[in-house]
Image: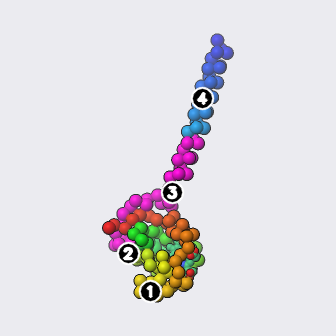
Amino acid sequence: MSTKLFIIAISVIGVALIAGVFVSLNRSATETTTPSTSTGRTDTVYTLEDVKIHDSKSSCWTIISGSVYDITSYIPRHPGGEEILRACGTDATSLFTMRRTSDGESVGSGSPHSPNAEEQLEKLKIGELAS
Ligand code: HEM
């Protein structure tokens, strides 16, 4: 009788362990396929006024192609140095995509940022600009 109970107990523990492993594998698979961002709030909608407040090195938000980015943490890492500060509190679409001001003045090379730069930017997205 006690042997029978022992076998039942071992079977229950075994099934629980297999289920646990299955659930955790399934969970990590889901996490890797879900797009992740630094903040996870990419669906928040901001107005131009919201962005304009963050116009300094200590809090720098910008708009690029209709999306809003908090680029503050990237400033010290920017390969182009402090030119990035031109973007703070404004629509920097032309600055980022062309490295040109809205008047057509060339900033640095005056050529578009690389795909790597675009990848860095995407990680800093916090939302969309209100239409
Ligand atoms: C919007 C204002 C910005 C301006 C005016 C600006 C300007 C520059 C300049 C002058 C350079 C030096 C290379 C060259 O002259 O071609 C540079 C390089 C670079 N910037 Fe920016 N930048 C801006 C924003 C950003 C942002 C938001 C990111 C990424 C989050 C970024 C990522 C990079 C990278 C990775 C490089 C190295 C070259 C490349 O990959 O294109 N920049 N930037």
For marks 2 and 3, the one nearer the N-term is: 3
Magenta-tinted stretch = 24-51
Disc 3 under 8 Å from ligand 1? The reply is no
- Residue 49 x, y percent position in the rendering: 34, 72
Secondary structure, mark 1, is loop
Instruction: Name the mark on residue 28.
Output: none
Viewer-proximal residue, 125 or 116? 116
Q: What residue is at 44 percent from the left and 78 percent from the top?
A: 94
Disc 3 marks a residue whose amino acid type is: Ser
Disc 1 marks a residue whose amino acid type is: Gly
For marks 1 and 4, the one nearer the N-term is: 4
Residue 53 position (above or below residue 10) = below
Whether pointer 3 and pointer 1 mark residues with C-beta atoms closer than 8 Å, the reply is no
For marks 4 and 2, the one nearer the N-term is: 4
Which residue occupies the extreme right position in the image?
A: 3
Q: Which residue position is annotated with label 2?
A: 52
- Mark nearer the viewer, 2 or 3: 3
